[in-house]
Structures are given as structure tokens and as C-alpha cells.
Amino acid sequence: MVKTNAISIEPKIENENVLLDFISSELSSLGYSEHWEFLVAAEEVFSNTVFYANIPIHNFINCLISYDAEKKQASLKFEDYGKPFNPLTRPVPELNLSIKERKIGGLGIHIVKDLMDDVEYEYDNVRQMNMLTLLKKL
């Protein structure tokens, strides 16, 4: 059985806690208390979307959370109407370099990919929507 719930949030950084509270509440209701990985990953995805996606006014960031009891996995799917952008194509940051030497960008998605078991990106040409799905086995 798959349980899914969703929230739509105005793309403002001050709404980040609304998203994190929603995710925490949903995962806690499933009895999954060790969900810090989802919160860190969601915070990274949400903030980058708010700051860089150029979402048109009066549009929202959708977050769908699903839990598959049979597969014992949960997923977060972020949808936005920003400019098309696949963060998975970012090069892996050169972590062996000092912060001063390192190029800006790519660290956040690197952290997300490291925390999750799978991360997938898709662009829906019909709805003109970015979709980023984060999957974690529980």
C-alpha cells in the first residue's frame, strides 16, 4: 500500500519551515523517527529552488511525500514551474580543494545525492514543470 500526501508552498525562503514541519509530521506519523536525512535534503532542494529557479509570480513549489509500506521506502517529489534545470548534471564538487579554491555550486545536490538512495530528475514539457524525486529506503 502506498500512502501519499502533498503540500503546495509559495516560493519564499520564510516558508521553508512549513515544508520541513510537513515532512517531519508525515514521516513521524508513519513511525519513522530517523528522518533528518529527508529534512536536510528537502531544505537544500527548497532553498535552491527559491533562490535560483525564477518561478513565475503566483506559482508554487509542490512537495509530494509518498510511503510504500511493501517496499519500505519513502520519497519526496518536488515540482516547480521554474526554468528547466537538471541539478543532477552538475559536476561533483572538488571536495579535496579548499573552500577558496573550490568553484561555487554543486555541493548542495552532492549532499542530497549522498543522503538519499536515489535521486531522479524529469522535466514535464506539457506542464512545463521541473520534477525532482528523492528516494530513501527506510
Image: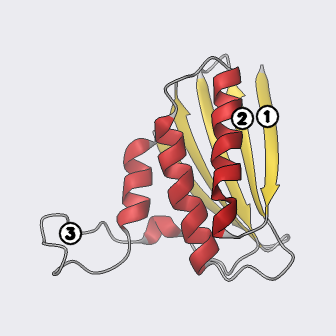
Name the side, left or right, on which 101 lies relative to 4: left
**Residue at x 71%, y 77% (from the top left corner):** 82
Of the image marks 3 and 1, the number of the one nearer the N terminus: 1
**Residue at x 68%, y 56% (from the top left corner):** 78
Local crowd size for mark 3, using a 10 Å CA cut-off: few (<14), some (14–19), many (≥20) = few
Circle 1: element type: strand
Name the side, left or right, on which 44 lies relative to 15: left
| Residue position for label 3 | 94
| Residue position for label 2 | 66
Q: Pointer 2 and pointer 1: residues touching (CB < 8 Å)?
A: yes
Q: CA distance from mark 3 to mark 1?
A: 37 Å
**Residue at x 76%, y 73% (from the top left corner):** 81
Quarter of the image for residue 50 reads bottom right
Circle 3: element type: loop
Circle 2: element type: strand
How many tags in the picture? 3
Local crowd size for mark 1, using a 10 Å CA cut-off: few (<14), some (14–19), many (≥20) = some
Q: Amino acid at mark 2?
A: Ser
